[in-house]
Image (cartoon, rainbow, N blue to C red):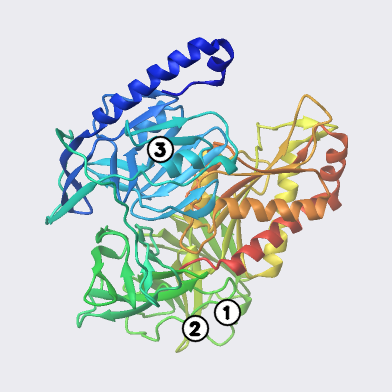
Amino acid sequence: MKITERMWDVLSHKRLMALALCCTTLFTNSIGVCAANKYVNMTLTYDYTQHKYSAEEVFVAINGNKLTGLKMPPIVLNNFTLVPAREVFEAMGATVEWKKDLEQVYVKYNDKLVVIPIGSTKAYVNGQATTMQTAAKIINNKTMIPLRFVSTSLGMQVSWDKKTRIADIDTGNISSGDIVETTEVTTTTVASTTTTEQTTTTETTTEITTVESTTETTTEQTTVADVNNISAITFSKGSSYKDIITIEGDYNPDVSKTFSSDNKTLTLSVNNAKLVTDKGDIGEGAYVSSGYYYQNNGNVVTISLNLKDSNTVVDVRQLGSNKTTVTVTYASSNSTDSNNNSSSSDDNSNISGNCGYDTENARFYFKNNGSINIKNIIEADNYNDLNYKLTLNGDYTSIFSNTTYPVNSNYINNINVSTTASSTVITFSEKKIMTVLISESNGYVYIKPVLPKERYSKIIVLDAGHGGNDPGASGNGLIEKNLTLGMLNKARALFDSDGTIKCYATRTTDTYPSFNDRTNLGNEVGDAFISIHINAAANTSAAGTETYSLYANDQGNGLTSYGLASEILKNLLDQLGTKDRKVKSENWIVLRQSKIPASLIEIGFITNSGDAAIMGSDAGQQKVAHAIFDSVKNLFNQYPPVR
């Protein structure tokens, strides 16, 4: 029993002595009661393995109120308490979201967001990468996450009472200095039995028995000298252009690759490495049908991948100081910079006549009579209208005729050729946003439709907030939709002039794309997404610049939404000299729906005369454009997008 300061104030000395005597008696009795603790005996299924679990019962309380009726009880693994994410953290007022495609848990409380990948010790707090001391797992079909790490990251304090075995979460605001990382020491026995398939469990049955408590123990992980401890192996599932395996360790993992004789099985060997996490499976992607990873004999971690097609290429790239990515894609999907087109095959066996469509190689072709310089072909990427036009100025009626070629491929519906004595226009009607690779060999010009990320090595998507019938905020004679569009178009011009980063825009005129249209464009083609907005307030003295991020959305190169928002804020402040209103986290729909690093930026307050003067001037908008351009270029150089 704890005597509070208030009790000291109200109790007389005589009553206090009596109370102290009573407490001594109760404390002595409580020790006797705790000598026999309740144990939980159950089977845990995770990582495709069944584990016999036997441990002292653990409880969770929120502000002193113990949670009851949990279908999956809290458990202790590696001396850390794991709890069911939704039941526990929603009970304390947090928002919990499960991202199935990413296999990540998002827990949001006030202005704090914690992103926890399953099976990894890596986590993100407001977009900043950090390391947990134990990994989250899916256990008996429940998402189990580290209680103390998540709670303290959300600004709460966790106290552990080893007598009552209650982890009590105080949701009141605390300073970071009050947070102490402490293990919940317990006596735990876990025995594993390998199974061939994942067991589906809808209810968890626990057996509780009473046994004599044994001595409390802790475990320590021993790091073998010079051996790389592999903390996480994650898989980016299924896009139309790549599959990515990310391997994280103490330092950059050394990965070698071997193909089977039929090129249908890829074996990755992580040399001089120890797997810290359990073995696991790899799901289906665009080019990978299935796979698994495990600790092989000695200091080798093996990753085995079954490939859907033998015509694949594998790129191994070390990122930062502790991460290696392995990208699997088709052999034809070689990335190039924005103005460099790669050569097509010299195989002319499938072509005939002056022009046509080569179905086998998925390319349009036409004969070059020697008068066509492919560098003079004018490209017009009308991606918002789903068409791509190539214009050849001059009279080429001897080669072309007015024809529509039905194609019905994955990318295009048809190809229309319109020719006159002054020009020829070749129009690709798109099913999805595409671009082309133009090459020439053996007297023919080849135009191959490809996805943007097969041509461009770096892609930014810019969004001008509001537009059309939605004017946004207004003040000091200015309208938000006009300001954001002006800033976007100036930034787009910088990217186009530079030529090393492809820039797509959700709108380039006074139109209104839906929220889905905006984020769909970013998710489909982009490596990062920036939405430009202008702030407003009833108080005209409110001023300054702020940026927002939500989910980390790391695509395997280390760039996060928080990193993007931080870099943009720094450059905006340097360019504009406005008040620093910091990087914030908010559940804006364009951030919530983005799957790539994304930031919403509030340039300044349209209702503040000082901010408005900057944003309303051509010079001010040009400074915003330079801040965006410099930020993206710096980040893409530091974190090259993975292809």
Q: Are marks 2 and 1 in contact (CB under 8 Å)?
A: yes
Name the residue carrying label 1.
Answer: 374
Q: Is residue 263 above or below residue 197?
A: below
Task: Give the label, 1 or 3, closer to the camera.
Answer: 3
Circle 2 sits on which residue? 440
Local packing at callout 3 (Cα closer than 10 Å; few below 14, some 14-19, many 20+) is some
Q: Please state which amino acid type lies under the numbered disc 1.
A: Ile
What kind of element bears circle 3? strand
Q: Quick check: 283 left or right of 376?
A: left
Pinpoint residue 324: horizontal percent, then vertical percent: 43, 70
Q: In front here: 270 or 357?
A: 270
- Mark 1 / mark 3, whichever is N-terminal: 3
At horizontal 41% and vertical 75% (from top left) the residue drawn is 316
The N terminus lies in quadrant: top left
Q: Amino acid at mark 2?
A: Glu
Q: Residues within 10 Å of mark 2 (few under 14, many from 20)?
A: many
Can you identify the residue that label 3 sits on? 97
Q: Given this view, does label 3 or label 2 mark the residue nearer the observer?
A: 3
Label 2, label 1: how many angstroms apart (C-alpha)?
8 Å
Front in this rendered view, residue 133 or 523: 133
Badge 3 amino acid:
Glu
Q: Is residue 306 visible?
A: no
Query: Whole-Å distance between the Cαs marked 3 and 2?
Result: 51 Å
